[in-house]
Amino acid sequence: MFNTIDIDRSNLTIMGVKFSDLKTLESTANALSSNMFEDFKPTPKGIEIIRDYITGKISLTELVILAKQKAYV
């Protein structure tokens, strides 16, 4: 079954999570969509984590730690 998420390109938000630019929003949306095919259910916190990884705010090591901790829930 296909689930949708709220993406607002004009306000630069995904599920209410704010983005600084359209390129980052689209990169995050692409990452989310590919993971959703594997049954990932995005949350605002999970979107923030992916956004922060894409923008370089957190490292791959930190991303893995957060994933193991299930911080995205």
Image: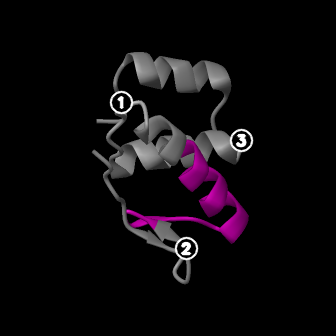
* Residue type at tag 3: Gly
The range drawn in magenta is 14-31
Left or right: 50 as drawn, with respect to 55: left
| Residue bearing the label numbered 2 | 12
Q: Position of residue 45 (x, y in %)?
A: 37, 46
Q: Is residue 56 left or right of residue 50?
A: right
- Residue in the picture at 45% in, 25% down: 66
In the image, residue 38 lies in the stretch drawn in magenta:
no
- The amino acid beneath tag 2 is Leu
Say whether disc 2 or disc 3 marks the residue closer to the N-terminus. 2
What is the three-letter code of the residue carrying label 1? Ala
Q: Which mark is residue 56?
A: 3
Decide if residue 20 is in sight here: yes
Considering only order in the chain, which callout, 1 or 2, is on the residue closer to the N terminus? 2
Question: Label for residue 71?
Answer: 1
The quadrant in which residue 25 appears is bottom right
In the structure shown, which secondary structural element does the residue marked by tag 3 occupy? loop
Q: Nearer the viewer, residue 17 or 25?
A: 25
Q: Are marks 2 and 1 in contact (CB under 8 Å)?
A: no
